[in-house]
Amino acid sequence: MRLFLIALTAAFAVWLPRAPAEGSEVPYIPAATIQAGQAVLTMPPGRYGSIQHVRTPLPPKAIALTFDDGPSPLYNTQVLDILDARGIKATFFFVGQYVRMHPEQVREVVRRGHNVASHSWSHPTYLRHWAREAQVSEVRKSYAALEAALADAPPEERARIEPMFRFPGLGEGAWMADWLNQRGIIVVSAEAGTDDWRGYSAESITRITLNAMESNRGGVLILHETRPQMIRALPGLLDELTARGFTFVQITAGPDGREQALAADDAVLTLR
């Protein structure tokens, strides 16, 4: 019987999920430093967002708004006006080729107190399947575009380029995530999305987002500034979230995190 139990245990062990490799995930950090409406993620560069990783360390019922896929010449200013009217600061994950086409939008975003970060150069959903050199090029070109757009900006506005990266379509690859972390770049996923990219109506976007934020008690939220239905939903959505007791914070690596990225070997972020 004892031999049978040993054999049975060994057989089950084959099917159990393996522990992650050392260094493949960041340790959980239970709280961010919250000051003046910002959530300073005082962490080693890691991977955050409970859709894929550990929960982003925000207080209960705190929401960090993040906008993907811009800058949009059609809708970006509308988003900024909606946020300004409510005193909310966000983080914009921009696509490099659109940054190069519309650098004035990047300058306006940081002028109004929002942060900007990379969402790749050309938004390839299957970036993780590309050759490694091509993946690196996507990241470097996107940061180069952000830095070129803000090269002549005041230092406090240049400092709003965050050492953060969001994979297009959240299609994360382990090799690229490690490469980014080694250069001080935080990989940002999310706790929830609005599903606005699916073409849903403003009413559906509002309902989905409210349910997601209630069930997650806040967290990092993905929106897309390129979707007109989201723009229509946004004012009422933000007002309803506020009425339900949610607060809004802006995620940032803070000065220490930015300095760490600037000082990294083979750095991606270079503009001081």
Image: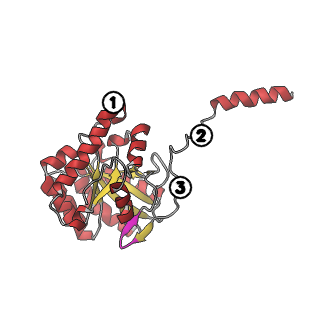
Q: Quadrant of residue 172?
A: top left
Residue 53 drawn above or below residue 29: above
What residue did someone put label 2 on?
19
The local crowd at label 2, few if under 14, some if 14 to 19, many if 20 or more residues have their Cα within 10 Å, is few
Q: Nearer the viewer, residue 258 or 15?
A: 258
What residue did someone put label 1 on?
131
The local crowd at label 1, few if under 14, some if 14 to 19, many if 20 or more residues have their Cα within 10 Å, is few
Of discs 2 and 1, which sits in the foreground? 1
Looking at marks 2 and 3 on the same chain, the residue that comes earlier in the sequence is marked by: 2
* Residue in the image at 79% along x and 29% along y: 6
What residue did someone put label 3 on?
28
Residue 85 lies, in percent from the top left, at 23, 69
Q: Quadrant of the N terminus?
A: top right
Looking at marks 2 and 1 on the same chain, the residue that comes earlier in the sequence is marked by: 2
What amino acid type is highlighted by mark number 1?
A: Ala
In the picture provided, is 58 more to the left or to the right than 112? Answer: right
In whole angstroms, how far apart are the C-alphas of marks 1 and 3?
Answer: 31 Å
Q: Nearer the viewer, residue 195 or 117?
A: 117
Q: Nearer the viewer, residue 118 or 195?
A: 118
Residue 130 lies, in percent from the top left, at 33, 31
Q: Which colour assignment does the render follow?
A: secondary structure
In the picture provided, is 40 more to the left or to the right than 232? Answer: right
Circle 1 sits in a helix, a strand or a loop, which is it? loop
Residue 218 lies, in percent from the top left, at 43, 60
Residue 185 lies, in percent from the top left, at 37, 51
What amino acid type is highlighted by mark number 3?
A: Tyr
Query: Is residue 39 shown in magenta?
Result: yes
In the picture provided, is 271 more to the left or to the right than 180? Answer: left
Circle 3 sits in a helix, a strand or a loop, which is it? loop
Q: Quadrant of the C terminus?
A: bottom left
The part of the chain drawn in magenta is 35-40
